């Protein structure tokens, strides 16, 4: 029979591994891009070309770097107006990498990074503890039933 201290160690170990796994799987999705844009990004005004407000609260835009024109799309907010307020021809703030203008996003990358981190942190810290509590409770009930 496993003693209480061993159960706690198992629980904490599984919890830490679960948190690290979630951050590894989901945490790097956009963080690196946001970090690059925060540290090396250039802010610019882009022209809104289309909006998809009823479906996904996103808009598409066009901007120029030198003589070249680039396009992008993304969500509203983070320093830009709500999608419902935008229409083709409006200006929107974007950030892009000077060395790679194809890498661009609308709005402030620092605010986007905080938002992304908050969502991932909520999932990473609370989902594993709930799953592990359910698992270990079910395991205990199964063992208690088996001993009868």
Image (cartoon, rainbow, N blue to C red):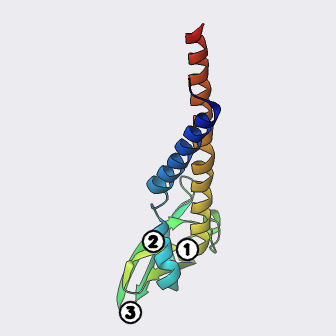
Q: Establish if 50 lies above or below 100.
A: above
Q: Which numbered disc, 3 or 1, marks the residue closer to the eye?
A: 1
Which quarter of the picture shows residue 8? top right
Give the percent coordinates (x, y) of residue 137.
Answer: 62, 26
Circle 3 crowding by C-alpha within 10 Å: few under 14, some 14–19, many from 20 = few
Per the image, the residue denoted by label 2 is: 33
Report the disc number at residue 66: 3
Give the percent coordinates (x, y) of residue 62.
Answer: 44, 77
Q: Establish if 135 lies above or below 98.
A: above
Per the image, the residue denoted by label 1 is: 109
Name which residue lies at 62% across and 73% down.
Answer: 80
Front residue (pair 140, 53):
140
Circle count: 3
The reply to whether residue 67 is visible in this rendering is: yes
The reply to whether residue 107 is visible in this rendering is: no
Horizontal side of residue 62 vs 51, given as left or right: left
Front residue (pair 120, 18):
18
Label 2–label 1 contact, CB within 8 A:
yes
Name which residue lies at 58% across and 36% down.
Answer: 6
Q: Quadrant of the C terminus?
A: top right
Mark 2 vs mark 3, CA separation in Å: 22 Å
The mark nearer the N terminus, 3 or 1, is 3
Q: Establish if 12 lies above or below 2.
A: below
Label 2–label 3 contact, CB within 8 A:
no
Disc 3 on helix, strand or loop?
loop
Circle 2 crowding by C-alpha within 10 Å: few under 14, some 14–19, many from 20 = some
């Amino acid at each position: 029979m496993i003693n209480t201290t061993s159960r706690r160690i198992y629980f904490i170990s599984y919890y830490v591994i679960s948190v690290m796994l979630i951050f590894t799987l989901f945490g790097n999705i956009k963080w690196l891009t946001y970090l690059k844009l925060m540290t090396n990004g250039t802010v610019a005004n882009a022209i809104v070309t289309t909006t998809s407000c009823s479906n996904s609260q996103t808009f598409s835009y066009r901007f120029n770097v030198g003589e070249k024109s680039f396009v992008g799309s993304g969500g509203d907010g983070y320093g830009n107006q709500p999608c419902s307020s935008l229409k083709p021809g409006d200006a929107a703030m974007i950030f892009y990498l000077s060395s790679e203008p194809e890498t661009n996003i609308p709005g402030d990358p620092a605010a986007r990074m905080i938002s992304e981190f908050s969502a991932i942190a909520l999932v990473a810290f609370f989902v594993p503890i709930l799953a592990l509590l359910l698992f270990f409770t079910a395991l205990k009930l199964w063992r208690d039933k088996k001993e009868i």
